Image: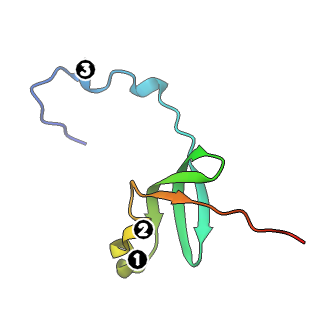
Amino acid sequence: MYIYSPMPWELIWEGAENFYPNYQEIKVGRLTLEVEPLSFNRARVVRLISTDPADYLDGPYQPGAVLEFVPKRVY
């Protein structure tokens, strides 16, 4: 990987060694999403994992989108 920047290398990578993301993989329908939990019923999409190019154009599942989960009632 090459990074062309006038900033010093130390500033670009500052804090990177202490970054430990809490990502989880979930299934939504036929899609697999890598998400970052925000709260008990919300998560931000980090990555979409699919072999179908049309899935990447679907707005609700693009990286950065926030998903809300509604718990199912169990009787």
Q: Nearer the viewer, residue 31 or 14?
A: 31
Q: Badge 1: few (under 14), some or many (20 or more) residues near its Cα, within 10 Å? A: some
Side of 35 where 47 appears, left or right: left
The Cα atoms of the two marked residues, 3 and 1, are separated by 36 Å
Asked if the residue at tag 2 contacts the one at tag 1, i.e. Cβ–Cβ closer than 8 Å, the answer is no
Q: Which mark is residue 8?
A: none
Q: Is residue 33 above or below residue 57?
A: above
Q: Mark 2 highlights which residue?
A: 60
Asked if the residue at tag 1 contacts the one at tag 3, i.e. Cβ–Cβ closer than 8 Å, the answer is no
Which residue shows up at 44% across the image and 66% down it? 61
Mark 1, secondary structure of its residue: helix
- In the image, what residue type sits under mark 3? Leu
Q: Where, by quadrant of the figure, is residue 11 drawn?
A: top left
The Cα atoms of the two marked residues, 1 and 2, are separated by 10 Å
Which quarter of the image is occupied by the N terminus? top left
- In the image, what residue type sits under mark 1? Asp
The Cα atoms of the two marked residues, 3 and 2, are separated by 34 Å
Q: Is residue 20 above or below residue 30?
A: above
**Tag 2 or tag 3, which sits nearer the N-term?**
3
Q: Nearer the viewer, residue 71 or 35?
A: 71
Mark 3, secondary structure of its residue: helix
**Tag 2 or tag 1, which sits nearer the N-term?**
1
Q: Mark 3 highlights which residue?
A: 11
Q: Is residue 17 above or below residue 68?
A: above
Which residue shows up at 66% across the image and 47% down it? 40
Which quarter of the image is occupied by the C terminus? bottom right
Q: Nearer the viewer, mark 3 or mark 2?
A: 2
Q: Mark 1 highlights which residue?
A: 55
Residue most extreme to the right: 75
Q: Nearer the viewer, mark 3 or mark 1?
A: 1
- In the image, what residue type sits under mark 2? Pro
